[in-house]
Image (tube, rainbow, N blue to C red):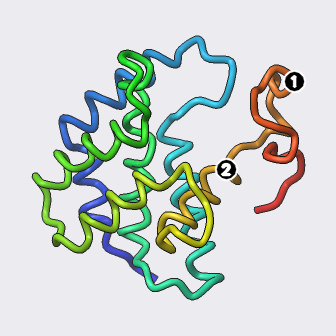
Amino acid sequence: MLTNMTRVNAIWEHPLYQQNLKELISLETDRIFCRHTPEHFLDVARLAYIFALERNIACSSELIYCTALLHDIGRAKQYTDGTPHDIAGVQIAEQILSDLDFSDEEKSQILTAIGEHRSSGKNVSPLSQILYEADKKSRMCFLCPAEQECYWSSDKKNMTIQY
């Protein structure tokens, strides 16, 4: 199956995205816990797409990948000025998406999911829910040398291979 990832790559290449990504990578250089790298963003995208397929959620792979690439882009702002990364991420993503070819509905779906990706439950959109779950399941706590020092509760940690 061939998919069109033109807009995913447009986000990746966007100067504001690259600026924030480089700053984030620099700020997390010495972080001993999970880092927010492109590998993490792509792991989240792939898991969210699996969840969408398994649950018959009508959401394109392109929209899922766009959302996953952007979901933690606000972390640098959180580290530098304390703005929660979901709020900062919505602000940054809104600027990026405004420069690209997204409909108002697509922008709304992406921005809502970024804003809600730290929440789970019945009051969030399906895209938000699968993004939340993929974000958590993407972490391989069972391989992490800092697992004992991690602030995540033991019930959140992924201590076995699940996906």
Name of the residue lying farthest toward the top? 30
Residue nearest the viewer, comparing 49 with 120: 120
Q: What amino acid type is highlighted by mark number 1?
A: Gln
Q: Quadrant of the C terminus?
A: bottom right
Crowd rating for badge 1 (residues with CA inside 10 Å; few <14, some 14–19, many 20+): few
Q: Position of residue 7 (x, y in %)?
A: 25, 62
Residue nearest the viewer, comparing 79 with 40: 79
Q: Position of residue 87 (x, y in %)?
A: 36, 41
Which residue occupies 59% across, 11% down?
A: 30
Name of the residue lying farthest toward the left? 99
Which residue occupies 77% across, 26% down?
A: 150
Q: Are marks 2 and 1 in contact (CB under 8 Å)?
A: no
Query: What numbered label is drawn on residue 148?
Result: 1
Where 157 sits versus 59, above or below?
A: above
What secondary structure is marked by label 2? helix
Q: Position of residue 20 (x, y in %)?
A: 31, 29
The residue identified by callout 2 is: 136
